[in-house]
Image (cartoon, grey):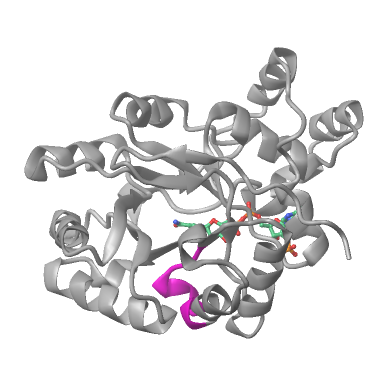
């Protein structure tokens, strides 16, 4: 059996918690496979699992956490309130349901999945998350798919900033302005679809860089995220790829590599623009 890899380094959050820089994403991981693949990820060295009410696999993710040969406090679990449940009471209820499905006493990080400006209830959800943190049912609270102006509104209306913003981010969509905004407010930026759902991997430039470093194109892209200081949660369906994706902490990209990858920016999204959802 191959040796486990060294776990990803932990980065600090503005509320004093720490979070592994790289975790395992579980969107579209079927509930029938999720426990096995999460345990596979933990065995290989992952310490972080990203799920959401939407994904339909919270029970399986929670089972993996409970069955892992690992103290609970070494594992970091994120879930998210789905957009239909934005609002104060609805978010509190959704949290109870997520925690029950996960079978955990406390969640490490809870996020508002999408702001949904058309229903305008995300500030109410944020107040609910603040309460959940005060009640110590969740350690850290953050947001997902928030533009700068959505975050600014949370800060203006509640005085509390999220510790993390999970957004679509990959070489086609490097989110430079948003990363700068987050950094200035001590908010960590986390990349979802860090490989653009695998679609960016066919790029010849990435093949060249992979040859240069003796790595795979996926490892080049994930290392690019690490060099930028992003948190990152790639999803993969095989033990080989799960391992490959964590194995990015023993090499570096140089300034020329980073400049070359910057030329891939096209603004293309694989998901929706948060202002129009
Ligand atoms: P990713 O960018 O992580 O890409 C996943 C795809 O890339 C899969 O098709 C996978 O194939 C393939 N892949 C993974 N590793 C490799 C590799 N080493 N070589 C070749 N292909 C590879 O996309 P996701 O959309 O899954 O995003 C990652 C995570 O981000 C999600 O799982 C979820 O946790 C989170 N997310 C959050 C969202 C939000 O709104 N907050 C929205 C979307 C995602 P295969 O599975 O066949 O191995």
**Would you identify the image quadrant in which residue 188 lies?**
top left
Give above or below for 105 relative to 124. below
Nearer to the camera, 39 or 123:
39
Is residue 109 rendered to the left or right of residue 46?
Answer: left
- Point 73% across, 40% down: residue: 248
Residue 151 appears in the picture as rendered: yes
Quadrant showing the N terminus: bottom right
Is residue 31 rendered to the left or right of residue 117?
Answer: right
Q: Position of residue 71 (x, y in %)?
A: 52, 66
Quadrant showing the C terminus: bottom left
The residue at the far top in this view is 256
Give above or below for 78 relative to 262. below
Q: Position of residue 92 (x, y in %)?
A: 19, 72
Nearer to the camera, 151 or 161:
161
- Point 17% across, 44% down: residue: 154
Give above or below for 242 relative to 178. below
- Look at the image and give the residue range highlighted in magenta: 50-59
Residue 112 appears in the picture as rendered: no
- Point 73% across, 50% down: residue: 245
Q: Is residue 71 magenta?
A: no
Q: Position of residue 59 (x, y in %)?
A: 48, 82
Picture mark count: 0
Q: Position of residue 23 (x, y in %)?
A: 58, 53
Is residue 197 rendered to the left or right of residue 267?
Answer: right
Q: Quadrant of ligand 1?
A: bottom right
**Would you identify the image quadrant in which residue 183 lies?**
top left
Is residue 195 rendered to the left or right of residue 269?
Answer: right
Nearer to the camera, 153 or 50:
50
């Amino acid at each position: 059996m191959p040796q486990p890899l060294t776990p990803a380094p932990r980065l600090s959050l503005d509320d004093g918690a720490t979070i592994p820089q790289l975790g395992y994403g579980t969107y579209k991981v079927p509930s029938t496979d999720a426990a096995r693949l999460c345990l596979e990820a933990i065995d290989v060295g992952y310490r972080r699992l990203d799920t959401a009410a939407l994904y339909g696999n919270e029970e399986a993710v929670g089972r993996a956490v409970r069955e892992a040969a690992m103290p609970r406090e070494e594992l970091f679990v994120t879930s998210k309130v789905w957009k239909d449940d934005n609002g104060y009471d609805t978010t509190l209820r959704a949290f109870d349901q997520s925690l029950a499905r996960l079978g955990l006493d406390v969640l490490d990080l809870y996020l508002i999945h999408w702001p949904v400006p058309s229903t305008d209830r995300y500030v109410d959800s944020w107040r609910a998350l603040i309460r959940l943190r005060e009640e110590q049912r969740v350690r850290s609270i953050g947001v997902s798919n928030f533009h700068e102006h959505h975050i600014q509104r949370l800060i203006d209306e509640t005085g509390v900033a999220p510790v993390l913003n999970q957004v679509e981010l990959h070489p086609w969509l490097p989110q430079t302005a948003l990363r700068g905004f987050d950094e200035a407010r001590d908010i960590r930026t986390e990349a979802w679809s860090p490989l653009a759902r695998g679609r960016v991997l066919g790029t010849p430039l990435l093949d060249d860089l992979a040859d240069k470093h003796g790595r795979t194109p996926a490892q080049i892209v994930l290392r690019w995220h690490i060099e930028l200081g992003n948190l990152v949660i790639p999803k993969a369906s095989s033990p080989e790829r799960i391992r490959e994706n964590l194995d990015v902490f023993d090499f570096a990209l140089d300034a020329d590599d980073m400049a070359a990858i910057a030329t891939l920016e096209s603004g293309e999204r694989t998901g929706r623009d948060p202002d129009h959802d």
